[in-house]
Every structure is written in structure tokens, then in C-alpha cells.
Amino acid sequence: MVLLVAAGMLVQGGKQRAHALEEGGVFLSSAALSQGEVGLVRVRADGRKAPSVVWLEKEIPLSPNAQKTRWVGFLGVDLREKPGIRKILVRRSRDGPQRELAIRIVPKDYGVRRLTLPKAMVDLDAKTLERVRSESKIVNRLWGEPPLPPSWDGAFIMPLEGEVVGPFGRRSIINEQPRSPHSGVDLRARKGTPVRAINRGRVELTADHFFSGLSVVINHGGGVQSMYFHLEKIAVEEGDLVEKGQVIGYVGSTGRATGPHLHFGVRVNGSRVDPLGLISMSQAILE
Ligand SMILES: [Zn+2]
């Protein structure tokens, strides 16, 4: 076993444990984040002016407490982000001095999953390929939009209770061919199980796509977007404002799915992150 001691990292019993960092009114949940991980930043402010945070060249919209003295935001690290040291730029007030903190992005191997699917679902004909490309353009456009102010109602919740049968991040080998990594988690659930919005937000996409089937994407503001795929039925419309826990659809197996389950994905600042990581990190919103 190789023991590694890097900045902001503690090695205990061979287990790497990243630890939090607090400096000049800025709190980071960790000074080291893995590919696909979600971090949290909390900034103390004087209550008059909003602080600003820039992470990976993106402004991170922050959510204040009632007194506007503590602001929190999420830092997303994409599944395929280049490892290395990155800076997070923080101003405790918009016209105040800028503070730079370093975060180490650590590579993570989530393993491999092998799937065998019907040939027609993998080797696509020209017409289907064209459909897939135009659908991915529609979806990818959503990740590039400027973030909205956070509309969270406390911590994020799971969309349903169900065992994780397909973990996040696994590299996929489908019919012996390498494909894109799994960008969400697959949750076991019976067909027709209600799927709930993981927090308050606005429905920004309802669609029926080749791969993801009946799909819903919700924008929660603060750079957080959630997606729910392979639904049997959609219960909301584009533009709807949904509350945390509201039923937005029902589990199915539409699109490219081997059976009924919910594919649940999350983007933070446009980055593909482990949705379970967002949910556990969001408990700190309440602190
Ligand atoms: Zn999936």
C-alpha cells in the first residue's frame, strides 16, 4: 500500500481522509476533492454585501442564512476533471480583497461495469445517431447556462427509497466496447414508484429521449441541476416550480434500460458529480 501525504490530506490507518479548512472567514469542507465529488464552501460576511466565490472559472451562487452573515455554495468536480491543484477565489464582499485557497483534485477510479444490451440499442443506425446527437445537444445546453440564485429549501433528499444497483462513475463497457462513464446512480424501484424532486426548483426539461427515455431535469439554482431518467410517466411540465418532495414522475424502463429503475443524476456547476455526495454534503446547509 502506498501512503500519500499531500496538502490538506491526512493518512490514517492507510485510509485517506481529506480534512476541512478554515481560513479568514472562509470554510471549505475539504482541501482535497476527488473526481466526481461535491465540496461545500461557507463564507462569513458582514450581512450587508454578498460575498463572491469563483471555482474552476465559474461564479458559484451562494445561499445566505436569514441574517445574511453566512453564505454557502457547492463546489462540483467533474468525473473527468484533470487532477492537480486548483484555486478557489473568494471575496467576503464583492468589492473587498480577494483571497485564494488551494484545493487538490484527486483522481478516483470508480471501477468498470460490463453490460450486454441488444445490438440495436448499441450499434445505432444513421437516423438514430442523428436523433441521439440532437437530443444530447438539447441536454448539454442546459449545463452551460448561467446559474440561477439558489432556491433550496434546506438539505437535498433522495428521489425515492431504493438500493443503489448501479453506482456512480463506473466506466461502461457495453457489448465489449468502452462507452461514457455512468454519470448518475441507478436506484432499484418497482415500476410506478413515485419519484420526488430532491429539492425546490424549476423544471427545465421534460423529454422523451432515445437513451434516457422519459426524462425530467430540474434546476435548483446555485448551480445545482438534478435529472431523473427512464420514467414511466412524467407528472410535471417545463417551467413548473416544484417543491422539495413533490412527485415529478413514476419509475419505468423507457429509453435504454434493462428493467424498471430510476437513473438519478446531478450536475453541480455543470460538472457530473455523485448525487449521493450532494445529498450528504447538503446536510451542512443547516449547520
Ligand atoms: Zn443509470
Image: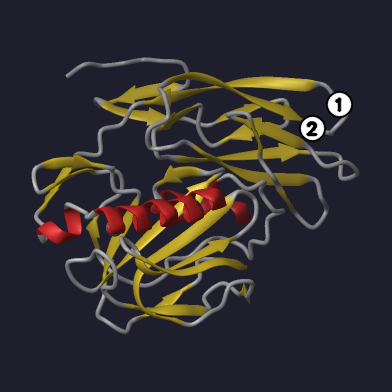
Q: Residue at x 72, y 45 (%)?
A: 71
Position of 38 with respect to 90 (left or right) is left
Q: Residue at x 51, y 26 (%)?
A: 31
State the quadrant of the N terminus: top left
Q: What is the secondary structure assignment of the residue under circle 1?
A: loop
Position of 102 with respect to 109 (left or right) is right
Ligand 1 under 8 Å from disc 2 Cβ: no
Q: Is residue 125 above or below residue 57?
A: below
Query: Residue 83, can we see it?
Result: yes
Residue 106 is tagged as none
Mark 2, other Cα within 10 Å: few <14 / some 14–19 / many ≥20: many
- x, y percentage for residue 199? 56, 66
- Amino acid identity at mark 2: Arg
- x, y percentage for residue 16? 32, 28
**Nearest the camera: 157 or 255?**
255
Query: What residue occupies the far right of the structure in this picture?
Result: 48
- x, y percentage for residue 105? 44, 25
Q: Is residue 287 above or below residue 92?
A: below
> Number of numbered discs present?
2
Mark 1, other Cα within 10 Å: few <14 / some 14–19 / many ≥20: few
Q: Residue at x 72, y 25 (%)?
A: 24
Q: Are marks 2 and 1 in contact (CB under 8 Å)?
A: yes
- Disc 1: which residue: 96
- Disc 2: which residue: 92
Task: Give the quarter the ligand 1 occupies.
Answer: bottom left
Query: Residue 287, can we see it?
Result: no
